[in-house]
Image (tube, rainbow, N blue to C red):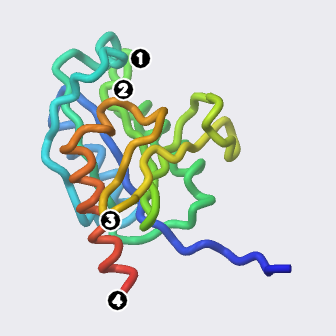
Amino acid sequence: MRKSHLPEKVKLITGLIAEDKNLFDEAFFYLERKFSKIDFKSDLLDFKNTNYYNNEIGSNLKRMFISFRRFINQETLADIKLFANRLEKKLSRNNKRTINIDPGYLTLSKLVLATTKDFSHRIYIKKGIYEEVTLLFKKDTFTELEWTYPDYRTIKYIETFNHIRRIYQTQISQ
């Protein structure tokens, strides 16, 4: 029988969606204080694949991905998502979110996202938080799955996660 062992630490990533670009910097301040220095920021990307957030956050939405220098333990993802939810509330105005903050983590083989929504392909972690493998790394690039969100299937997002993976790969080999 094989002995169990703890998995390697993983690279924390966060996707943010907002209409007001200044909110990104405000969120970065709190996220860095909590998790460590940000070591990567993506370009500001148009977020147009869904109107899911339009009524609450706005209609001219932008997306940005960040990653953090310090690694995390995989089992902390639920607590990180709960912190992100509290931060969204802190940055809200008139009882409406102004920013969406979606944490996840990246390994050499996959991208995992946290969510509060259950579905057949999502695994319950704790405290009302689920996780899903959103992308797999195969043949030198991240690839989509049947349930991967449409925006996560785009070339720009895939290039972003491939870049973060290279950062992670360099960090773990040092």
Q: Which residue is mark 1?
A: 95
- The three-letter code of the residue at mark 4 reads Gln
- The three-letter code of the residue at mark 3 reads Arg
Name the quarter where the C terminus is drawn.
Answer: bottom left
Instruction: Report if the CB atoms under discs 2 and 1 are less than 8 Å apart.
Output: yes
Pick whichever of labels 3 and 2 is earlier in the sequence.
2
The answer to whether residue 24 shows anywhere in this view is no
Compared to residue 160, the image places residue 170 above or below, namely: below
Q: Quadrant of residue 16?
A: top left
Compared to residue 19, the image places residue 103 above or below, namely: below
Mark 2 lies on a secondary structure that is loop
Pick whichever of labels 4 and 3 is earlier in the sequence.
3
Q: Which residue is mark 2?
A: 92
Pick whichever of labels 4 and 2 is earlier in the sequence.
2
Q: Which residue is mark 3?
A: 165
**Eye-nearest disc, 1 or 4:** 4
Q: CA distance from mark 4 to mark 3?
A: 14 Å
Mark 1 crowd level (few <14, some 14–19, many ≥20, 10 Å Cα) = few
- The three-letter code of the residue at mark 2 reads Ser
Q: Quadrant of residue 167?
A: bottom left
Q: In the depicted view, which residue is nearer to us: 26 or 43?
A: 43
Q: Which residue is mark 4?
A: 174
